[in-house]
Amino acid sequence: MRFRLTDDQRALRQGVRDLLARRFGRDALRAAVERPALDRELWRELGAAGFFALRLAEAEGGVGLGLPEAVLAFEEAGRALLPGPLVATHLAAGRVPGAAEGETVVTTADTGGPVEWLTEADVVEGDVSGAVALRSVDPLTPLHRLPGRAGRTAPEPVAVLLTAAEQLGTATRACELAVQHARTREQFGQPIGAFQAVKHLCADLLVRVEVARAAVYAAAVTAGPADIAAARLLADEAAVRGARDCLQVYGGMGFTWEADVHLLLKRAWVRTRRAGGGTESEELLAGELLAGAGR
């Protein structure tokens, strides 16, 4: 398979990055942390840019692109730590009125994970009776816990993959921040990046990001359940371990509220609890291996 991006795909990725840099840069991120709320104006701007309608057919008012392009857009959203139920609204485009345009915010009660943005959403898909508010570790992701119910359906593979794309974006940002800090922070008269221990941390960060990127991009092409499960596991690991290693590079500064590194780690933690993460993907892969051994 050839995973080199086309010119159109690179332009799409750059366009999403530029939009988010302009509308949700660091100042906007920190302001949202201090006053958590869903930015409806930004949501509508994303809708106008085709973010939610990216995979919707042109005949239905969408952009008419595919899963690889959606993965690139959600990777950029994860890199910017864009808050909100992005995946649920994207999947609802063309099915829930206003979702494609960003006028309607949609969240979902998935297969047992916490429900994100329950009170702020306009449309809630699934049974959320008995939901209890949780104190979320991530200040930009309000959560509700649902009571245990039997018979929940398996998560939609596209939702699992787009979550993996968000995790990949967050892991990429952690790598960027770690390298930038290693180049500029000085100790003993030289940048800390000159020390072998810091070099190893940054190298490990990059390796995990690139391995996860290859898996996520491949799963976007094949759309195979096993490929998506593997991509999700690798992206979750890259995001969580990457943010932790970034904290190590930053040292004591990384644990302060003023630094952004803790926000990366907290968002990565919350996403690992979303449908298709952890044990669910491991069990799917184990089932595929057992089935392959029996053939």
Image: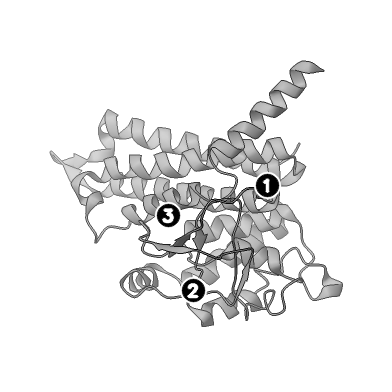
Circle 2 is placed at which residue position?
Answer: 119
Is residue 219 in sight in this rendering? yes
| Distance of label 1 from label 3 (alpha carbons) | 23 Å
Residue at the outermost left position: 188
Q: Nearer the viewer, mark 1 or mark 3?
A: 1
Element under label 1? loop
Q: Quadrant of the C terminus?
A: top right
- Point 69% across, 42% down: residue: 219
Residue 32 is situated, as x and y percent measured from the top left of the image, at: 37, 72
Toward which corner of the image does residue 218 lie, by quadrant?
Answer: top right
CA gap, disc 1 to disc 2? 24 Å
Element marked by disc 3: helix
Q: Is 192 above or below relative to 108?
A: above
**Residue position for label 3:** 267
User: Which amino acid lies under the numbered mark 3 shown in the image of this protein?
Assistant: Arg
- Residue 37 placed where, x, y %? 42, 75
Against 27, residue 184 (above or below) is above
| Amino acid of disc 2 | Thr
Locate residue 240: give its quadrant.
top left
Residue, disc 1: 154
Query: Is 46 positioned to the left or the right of 227 in the image?
Result: left
Q: Quadrant of the N terminus?
A: top right
Q: Circle 3: is it few (<14), some (14-19), or many (20+) Cα within 10 Å?
A: many
What is the distance, in whole Å, between disc 2 and disc 3 at their CAs?
Answer: 19 Å
